[in-house]
Every structure is written in structure tokens, then in C-alpha cells.
Amino acid sequence: MEESDNQLLDRYAAGDESAFEELVRRHQRTIYDLAYRMLENHADAADLAQKTFVQAFLHHRTFRRASSFRTWLFQIGLNLCRNALRGRVRVPHEDVEDVILQAPQDTFATAAAAELQDRLGHAIRGLPPRQREALVLRVYHDQAFADIGAIMSCSEGTAKANYHHAVHNLRRVLVEGKGKP
Amino acid sequence: MTCQEVQDWTVAYLELDLDASCVREVTAHLEGCPSCRAEMEAVRQVLVRLKGRTVTDPGERFWSEFPAGVHRQLRDAQGKEGSPPGPSPRRRVRNHIPLRAWPLALAASVMLVAGIWLLASRLGPPNEGPAPNGQTVVQAPVKGLPDPPDLVEADWPGAWYEDPDTILVEMASSLDRRTVDRLFGEI
């Protein structure tokens, strides 16, 4: 039977370095995904994902286990994302290698789909930060609204409202073609 | 149910986040309202498109090296903050000494303290000191030993009454050889 995150944390607290590696491996993809969807380039996402784990392990004694370890990682990761986005002076960019990897094949349908995805990406970037966070946590990480509230330090209802506004804003931009959400 | 109410609940309806009675009401409204059906479909398309946005996988090499990168950054941060993660310093020491070696470690510590005490007593206690009743006690010089040299002028290597190593060898020779080997061999 697989050990729980809390059991691994106990082992790490007792000096077992293998528990550290297991915890990182278990959550690295999730945290990288979150960081990538917020920052939209590989280098920043990789750096932020590593920082998230560093902060978690530096302060693991302060984790009260009222929520899951994953939720706690999301909280740390989102805080770091907010700081990173605040510090940005220009519009987030995509790595050249990302663009090449994601470039569609040369057909009319895929070009149209890519154009739509591009507009969607632009619309997501234009969302207010809280709406974007709620959207990412709900759509890509299947978090319950109660957990999204815990991660974003707000009530479940506020998390739900942020998500609903985000979807409606995107719908307005994509379907009605209105500028920024 | 009005069109506005249905459109407010569109996302919740698609997310299956409504109770059964609301779902029935919205479904009934949609059957007879083309504009709400169109709105519902538009929102559904947005959710489908959102779900379709994938993140490029950076590759297995990136993932296999990721924990080591975290570990390096953690060590750096730990150095800056001065508080090592993981076990407390006391627990680290405990973890590095196997349980069965603790009695031996204790015995070795006792021997060390006794050795230092013996060494100190051989070198001689201070000559003067207040007695418990307040009187000053002057200790007679030990017979056969020269007066200690003045602190400033002392030729320190020659000033030892006996070589400390010799004393330790004497102490060790008074123990059974096998006991000494066992005590120090296992620590």
C-alpha cells in the first residue's frame, strides 16, 4: 500500500532523505503544470516549481495538516506565482521551443483551431488574477470549490463566483469577440 | 424559471454543481428556449476548449533531474536561513549512533571524564581557596615536586609534572586489554 503524504513527511522529519525525493516526484508534475499555466513559459515554470518545493521543505514544520500536502503546495505555488506576475514588466511570453513544439500542422482546420487557442490564451491572460487562479485550479487540477477556497484563502462561495465569472468572461471574449475580459 | 436565472446557472449546470430539482428546472427551460440552449452550448464550448489546452511535457530527463535540483536549492536556502530542514540537530546525532552503541558511548564518555579528572588532580589543585566557613586555606606544597614556575616566565613544555600521554597510557594499562579494544573498536 502506498504511503500517504503525511507518512512521508513524518519520515522526512525523522531524517529519511528518500521520503523527500518521493514527495517531490509525487507532486512535481502537478506543481509544474500549475506554474506553467500561470506563467506560460518553461523556464519560469521550472524555476517556480522548484522554489515551491524548497519553501515547503524549509517550512515543513509549520504545516499543520489541516489540509492535504497537495493543497498546501498549491497555496505556496500560487503565492509565488502572484509575486512573479507582479514583478513582470511586460506581457508573459512563450519560449521559442514551446511555440515550435506546439505549432500545428499546416492545414486549414488546425490553423483555425490554433487561432482559437491563441485567442483563448490571450483571454485567459487578461482575466483578473483571482478569476484566473480559480479557473486553473478547477479546470486543470479538478479541485473542489472548498479546496480552491482553502488554497486562495477565501470562502467556497467566493471561489465559485470567481470561477463562474472567469468562464463567462472567456465566453464573452471568444464568442462575442469583445476585447479584454 | 427566467432566461436570466438559467444563464446565471449555466456553468453550475455544466459542472453538475446544482441540486436535482434545479437541474430539472433548467433542463425543462432549455427544451423550450433556443437562445438559452445557444448560450449553454457557447459556455460548453469554452469549457471544452479550456480542457483542450495542454502543457508541453518537458521530458523524462527534466523530471528525473527535478528532485536533485530541488535538493540543491534546498541546501543553498538552508545555508542562508541557518535552519536545516528535516530532523532537528539533536535527532540527527541520535540517528547516526546505532541503538546498541549507546551504552558503549556512555561508558567511553564516563572514562573520558574520569581521565580528565585524574589528569587535573595529578597536575595539582589550586593552592589557595576560601574554606566553606570563610577561612582561607593554604595548601602545603606537594612533597618531591618543585614549586610551579611563574606564569609569564614558565617554559611550558618542560613545566608539566608528568606527560599527559603517559598518564592516559597508565590509565589504559590498568584496564583489561580486551575491554579496551571492545569499547573503542565498536564506537
Image: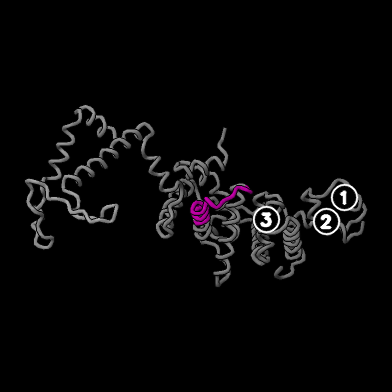
Q: Position of residue B109 (x, y in %)?
A: 29, 40
In the visual, does B84 lie left or right of B22? Answer: left
Give neighbour class at mark 3: few <14, some 14-19, many 20+ (Cα, 10 Å): few
Residue B114, x across and y down, in percent = 25, 40
Q: Secondary structure at mark 2?
A: loop
Spatial separation of the CA atoms under disc 1 and disc 3 = 38 Å
Tag on residue B167? Answer: none
Name the residue located 75 percent from the left edge and 62 percent from the top edge. A165
Q: Which residue is mark 1?
A: B22
Disc 1/disc 2 C-alpha distance (Å): 9 Å
- Would you identify the image quadrant in which residue B119 lies? top left
Q: Distance of mark 3 from mark 2, alpha carbons? A: 32 Å
Circles 1 and 2 in contact, beta carbons < 8 Å: yes
User: How many marks do you count on the picture?
Assistant: 3
Badge number at residue B9: 2
Left or right position of A15 against A63: left
Q: Which residues are magenta?
A: A51-67
- The circle drawn on residue A109 is 3
Q: Quadrant of the C terminus of chain A?
A: bottom right
User: Which tag is nearer the camera, tag 1 or tag 3?
Assistant: 1
